[in-house]
Image: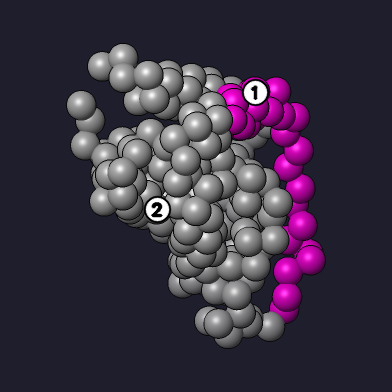
Amino acid sequence: MIHPFVEGAILGLTISVLFGPALFALLQTSIHRGFRSGALLAIGIFISDVTLVFLCFVGALQILNNEYNKLFFGIVSGFLLIGFGIATYTRKIQIENDANGLEKKKPGWLTYILKGYFMNIANPFAWIFWMGVTVGVTSNYGEKTHDAMLFFAGVLFTIVTTDILKVYVAKKLKRFLKPENISKINKFVGVLLFAFGIIMIVRVLAYHFKWF
């Protein structure tokens, strides 16, 4: 069986290559404002992800006291991931170059952290995604809270590490930001998220019915 941290890192790597508003904001900020500004934005996004995971995890522990709740919400979470996978696979790509809209005066370090934090935490899809993953993972690991925490440590560590790496190589990545390339990557990520959803459903059913 895969170690929870490694399993989380795999999901984190899958999420990190997803082209969405946060990634475009990271790349754009890095290209126009430099590595430091992009890294601060990435830290803000990371802190918001930690906040979301914590809130969802606490809520999940309350919900999943009952074995049937674990089964129900674990299956629902799996289908949510499948839904995200389908949405990602079929997403239409639009690239906006709004460099003229950037501020002439470079903001302070706290501005970028707060921008990353609120940009991510105000995204309803981030709440839905993390709630689905958190409930599903908590259902899968059952009473093994420590393993669930290791899983999320793997997810969050991988996301923030790859985000900072993307900030570092932002100018090199810019030439790959063509709709056809992004569409191919999103389709691949969509398939992976779909697969994670299927695995989550199978695992929660196996745990509930003691198949293994």
Amino acid identity at mark 2: Leu
Q: Residues within 10 Å of mark 1 (few under 14, many from 20)?
A: some
For the stretch drawn in magenta, what is the main secondary structure? helix
Measured as percent of width and height from the top left, residue 65 is found at 45, 46
Q: How many marks?
A: 2
Residue 156 — which label? 2
Identify the residue position indicated by label 1 in the image. 86
Q: Residues within 10 Å of mark 2 (few under 14, many from 20)?
A: many
Q: Is residue 110 visible?
A: yes
Measured as percent of width and height from the top left, residue 142 is found at 35, 39
> Relative to 118, does residue 175 appear above or below in the rendering?
above
The magenta region covers: 76-104
Task: Residue 144: name its quadrant.
Answer: top left
Q: Which of the image's four quarters has the C terminus?
A: top left
Q: Residue at x 37, y 49 (%)?
A: 152
> Relative to 4, does residue 42 appear above or below in the rendering?
below
Measured as percent of width and height from the top left, residue 196 is found at 46, 26
User: Does the magenta-highlighted stretch encompass residue 79?
Assistant: yes
Would residue 181 be found to the left or right of residue 197 on screen? right
Whole-angstrom CA distance, mark 1 to mark 2, is 23 Å
**Front residue of 195 and 112:** 195
Amino acid identity at mark 1: Ile
Task: Residue 161: name its quadrant.
Answer: bottom left
> Relative to 8, does residue 183 appear above or below in the rendering?
above
Q: Secondary structure at mark 2?
A: helix
Q: Which of the image's four quarters has the N terminus?
A: top left
**Front residue of 55 and 101:** 55
Q: Is residue 12 visible?
A: no
